[in-house]
Amino acid sequence: MNTTVDRTGNDHGSAQGRYGFVGIIVENRRRHGMRINQILADHSHCIVGRLGLPNIDHSELSIVTLIVHASTDELGSLTGKLGALPGVSVKSALYKTGAREA
């Protein structure tokens, strides 16, 4: 089994999580950018990929998309901390285990 250990020494085995995404819309990147990056760094053990579009249309609006492999608790921690910041909107979803194609 593939495992990672976060900064607190907690072991996060790959069998514990599910794949999903997090969409983040930031209204004022200059004001919240450093805090957002710190939250993402604190949860880096569950972030598989990241795409960021800063300064959309030469404004302060930015969009970040994350691909994650996380438990529901880990995802809740990440999205809760991000969503608590004023001017930051967050939406997320995890793959449902056992989902079948119709």
Image: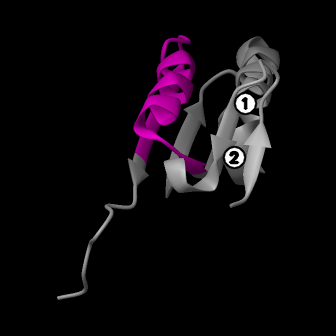
- Mark 2, residue position: 47
Point out residue 33 in the picture as x, y percentages from the top left corner: 78, 22
Toward the viewer: 97 or 30?
97
Residue drawn where x is 41% and y is 53% of the image = 94
Residue contact between numbered discs 2 and 1, judged by CB atoms under 8 Å: yes
Neighbour class for label 1 at 10 Å: few (<14), some, many (≥20)? some
Toward the viewer: 56 or 1?
1
Say what secondary structure mark 2 lies in.
strand
Left or right of 42 in this view: 63? left
| Amino acid beneath label 1 | Leu
Point out residue 54 in the picture as x, y percentages from the top left corner: 78, 42
Quadrant for the C terminus, please. Answer: bottom left
Residue drawn where x is 72% and y is 30% of the image = 40
- Mark 1, residue position: 40
Neighbour class for label 2 at 10 Å: few (<14), some, many (≥20)? some
Q: Is residue 17 visible?
A: no
User: Toward which corner of the image does residue 60 lie, by quadrant?
Assistant: top right
Say what secondary structure mark 1 lies in.
helix
| Amino acid beneath label 2 | Ile
Residue drawn where x is 26% and y is 72% of the image = 99
Point out residue 22 in the picture as x, y percentages from the top left corner: 53, 45
Quadrant for the N terminus, please. Answer: bottom right
Label 2, label 1: how many angstroms apart (C-alpha)? 8 Å
Toward the viewer: 52 or 92?
92
- Please determine whether, in this image, residue 35 is positioned above or below residue 7: above
Stretch of the chain drawn in magenta: 69-92
- Please determine whether, in this image, residue 84 is positioned above or below residue 93: above
Taking the magenta stretch, the answer to whether it contains residue 16 is: no
